[in-house]
Image (tube, rainbow, N blue to C red):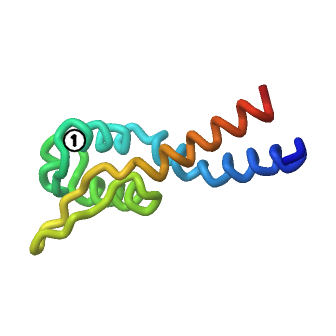
Amino acid sequence: MDNFTEKDEAIRLFRDSIPIFQALSDPARQDIIILLDEQGQLNVTEIANHSKLSRPAISHHLKVLRDIGLVSIDQRGTQRYYSLSLKDSVEKLKALITVVEKTCL
């Protein structure tokens, strides 16, 4: 792979990672991620019980996190339980770091 192609790959990976950075930049979403890491699977009510945010606000933040793949849902009857699903995002960020180290440092 020549340098031009590597830089193109770095730009592509960086742009693909922007939604992850945007989601992680919000303190409420950071709190949700930390809570799910500490507690495991939780439903919206359980998450809201640990937050100052309303249930609708929690649902909105969970949707953002779900849409980019940072959380997953386990449907149990009428309840939806959320848990962390970081593998794909972590792999994407690792690839970005690798290509940036290779092309920019």
Check disc 1 and give the amino acid type. Answer: Lys
Residue occupying image coordinates x 26% and y 39%? 37
Question: Where's residue 74, x and y in %?
Answer: 21, 64
Residue occupying image coordinates x 18% and y 51%? 41
Residue that protrudes farthest toward the front in the picture? 1
Q: Residues within 10 Å of mark 1 (few under 14, many from 20)?
A: few
Q: Is residue 4 left or right of residue 70?
A: right
Q: Is residue 17 left or right of residue 65?
A: right
- Vertical placement of residue 55 versus 52, above or below: below
Residue occupying image coordinates x 71% and y 39%? 99
Question: Where's residue 105, x and y in %?
Answer: 78, 25
Residue that protrudes farthest toward the top in the picture? 105
Question: Where's residue 28, x and y in %?
Answer: 35, 42
Question: What residue sits right under mark 1 in the picture?
Answer: 52
Residue that protrudes farthest toward the left in the picture? 77
Residue occupying image coordinates x 40% and y 52%? 70
